Amino acid sequence: MLVGTLTMHIHLHGIGSLKDKRRIVKSLIERLKNRFNFSVAEVDANDSKQLAVIGIATVSNDSIHITKQLDKAIEFARADPRFNLGQTEREIFSST
């Protein structure tokens, strides 16, 4: 079994409150879960209005499939006009 993880740094501009940030982040998380069937959560920078760090995890028996799915998640996030996608970190490892 292979596990793929992706960390995305999301830069939000013009956000007036943490409530506004959380609305955008929650929307992105739900859309990623629904579209790709990933496990997704905000994993860092919870108290920052300008930055959100999103963690994604997926499981497969094929590293090529994991890579393609994580690439699609990155492109999906890049297409969202509400924020800019910053640094991304990807890792694929065997759980055995």
Image: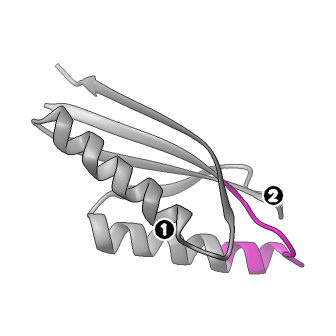
Counting from the top left corner in percent of width and height, residue 63 is at 19, 33
Quadrant for residue 24, please give it. bottom right
Residue extending farthest to the top is 96
The answer to whether marks 2 and 1 mark residues whose Cβ atoms lie closer than 8 Å is: no
Residue at mark 2 to residue at mark 1: CA–CA distance: 17 Å
Q: Would you say residue 15 is visible in this rendering?
A: yes
Q: Pointer 1: what residue?
A: 29
Residue lying at 87% horizontally and 75% vertically, measured from the top left: 14
Q: Is residue 35 above or below residue 1?
A: below
Q: Report the residue at 83% width, 69% height from top.
A: 13
Residue 3 lies within the magenta run: no
In magenta, the rendered stretch is 10-22
Q: Which mark is residue 15?
A: none
Front residue (pair 58, 64): 64
Q: Which residue was labeled with disc 2?
A: 47
Amino acid at the residue labelled 2: Asp
